[in-house]
Amino acid sequence: MLNLIDYLQKNWLEDLGILTTLICVWLNTRQNVWGWFWAIIASGIYGVIYWQFQLYSDMELQVVFIAISIYGWYQWLFGGEKKTELTVSNLPSKYYIPCISVLLIFTAFSGFMHGKYTNASLPYVDSSLTAISLIAQWMMAKKYVQNWLLWITANIGYIGMYFFKHLYGTSVLYILLLILAIIGYREWKSTKVSVN
């Protein structure tokens, strides 16, 4: 019991990050706009954690997530036709090549820069997961149902990376996020009304 108390005292920030992230993603699966508020809080907390663990691409990602969360909050409320609430839709095919290009270019550039100029751990793995997450978060802000497929992919990668970095609580979080992403995909797919 004493070891658990010691662990919780040493890892309170990670525990708070886990809690706020779960609240955020659960609300997102329900298409509740307050998920964006919790996304901002969780991103701020995890930005600090990733800096402490030298996962710089993930740290940078949290700053971008805060900006995308503000954008997503607005989009969900006013991004629909005539400034109405945005509805779930499919990713238009015109975005396939740009999304793949962003993934490849970001991974190569960020992985190289962090690998050469910082003491980053796992620079290419971290950068590729960051790129997938950026694309997925943008897709979520636009309510494209395929965002959940990217989150499923990213969550699988993150589970392994965080376990390797001994962030066991965060690894468990990403197992839960994987489950929520599967639920989110099923929920959003069943409510999809708009076709692009």
Image (cartoon, rainbow, N blue to C red):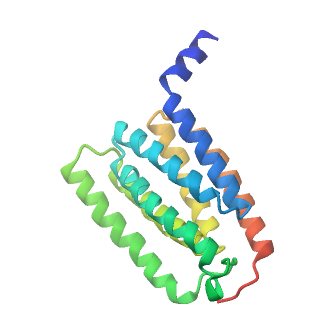
Location of residue 130 (image quadrant): bottom left
Lateral position of residue 112 relative to residue 7, left or right? left
Q: Residue at x 36, y 54 (%)?
A: 60
Q: Quadrant of the N terminus?
A: top right
Q: Residue at x 67, y 46 (%)?
A: 176
In the image, residue 11 above or below residue 86? above
User: Quick one: 62 or 104, which is closer to the camera?
Assistant: 62
Q: Quadrant of the C terminus?
A: bottom right
Q: Check the image and name the residue furthest to the right.
A: 190
Q: Residue at x 62, y 40 (%)?
A: 19
Evaluate whether residue 25 shows in this view: yes
For the image, the number of numbered tags is: 0
User: Quick one: 27 or 183, which is closer to the camera?
Assistant: 27
Q: Residue at x 62, y 52 (%)?
A: 24
Q: Measuring from the top left, give residue 85's x and y in whole percent.
A: 67, 77
Q: Measuring from the top left, give residue 104's x and y in whole percent.
A: 38, 71
User: Quick one: 89 or 163, which is closer to the camera?
Assistant: 89
In the image, residue 7 above or below residue 187? above
Q: Measuring from the top left, give residue 37's x and y in whole percent.
A: 57, 55
In the image, residue 114 above or below residue 150? above
Lateral position of residue 15 relative to residue 189, left or right? left
